[in-house]
Image: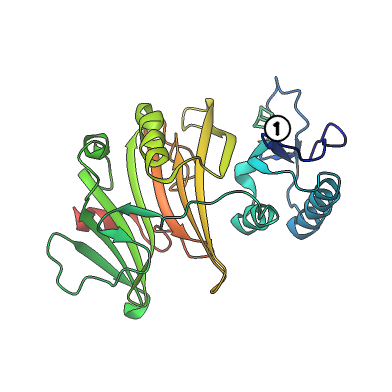
Amino acid sequence: MSAAGRAPPAGDDDTGFGVYIHWPFCLAKCPYCDFNSHVRERVDERRWLAALQSEIDHYAALAPGRTVTSLYFGGGTPSLMAPETVAAVVVAHPEVPEPTRELRFGPRFGLGLAFPEDAGDTKCVTKQHGSVNVCISEDDWPVEIEPVFRISSVIYQGSKIIARYVDGRATRYFANFPTGAYDRVVGHFRGVYGPPQLLWDRKVMLSDGLTVDNPVTVWRKTYPATGTIVYLEVRRHDDVRRDFADGRMGVVRLYIDGTDSVFAGMSTGNFLLLR
Ligand code: SF4
């Protein structure tokens, strides 16, 4: 983590400040790289998290009353951080303003929604002795953004939404869009929820070996009564499905922190059955 010294105290002209989190690990060292990055077989993430939290606490004490308006994850390869480590770092910034509205995919799709007994336009695969259902439905994006989500991919055709239901309740949603529409999708959610809480600047490798920027824009909402944290994420390149990032598709996903991926236990064959 870097910081350029003591932050000035809060005042009427306080416009907030950003925090940079450095994750100095990569799977391999690129020959041209002069970043502070290192290859390690194993990283003790508990120790790293403790160190990050200690550093955050230290600089928080030097900036009383100031507002953190963005978190920036760099590296190295910060996408290698375990989700729990990222979440714990994020929770270390309770002053980041959050949306007041419930985070949703569209009017019809919200977390906690009951598994649809009447299938209608929905096709599902059942897993884990019936406790998990993964379903593909027609979307209900607002008309101004819906065309962006009409795609042709190996997992579905058209404008669809994938949902994961655990014990009858929706825990995750997923949809792809063409990579070139990233700014438009982010703009749509900005219009609905306001400024995002997190901006991650990541690099990912495509299947042809090319390394590209993969910005991620994140809205977060916490529910103190239950301790539930919900994230809405837009990624320019879909790097959540496979080892390599998708050069053609971006992804938007909505999920309850700590729940399994939409794709956990699912194969490409499962999705072929749903088409
Ligand atoms: S992935 Fe990025 S930070 Fe890591 S070695 Fe390659 S260029 Fe450097």
Residue 115 drawn at (x, y percent): 27, 71
Residue 38 drawn at (x, y percent): 77, 37
Q: Is residue 249 above or below residue 139?
A: above
Q: Is residue 241 toward the left or the right of residue 114 in the image?
A: right
Q: Is residue 258 above or below residue 238?
A: below
- Residue 165 appears in which quarter of the rendering? bottom left
- Residue 274 appears in which quarter of the rendering? bottom left
Helix, strand or loop at mark 1: loop
Image point (19%, 62%), residue name: 123
Total label count? 1
* Type of amino acid under label 1: Asp
Q: Is residue 144 toward the left or the right of residue 127 in the image?
A: left
State ligand 1's quadrant. top right
Q: Is residue 240 above or below residue 255?
A: above
Local crowd size for mark 1, using a 10 Å CA cut-off: few (<14), some (14–19), many (≥20): few
Q: Is residue 31 above or below residue 23?
A: above
Can residue 134 be seen by looking at this rendering? Answer: yes
User: Is residue 44 or residue 110 the one in the foreground?
Assistant: 110
Residue topped by disc 1: 13
Can residue 76 be seen by looking at this rendering? Answer: no
Residue 205 drawn at (x, y percent): 53, 32
Residue 33 drawn at (x, y percent): 71, 23
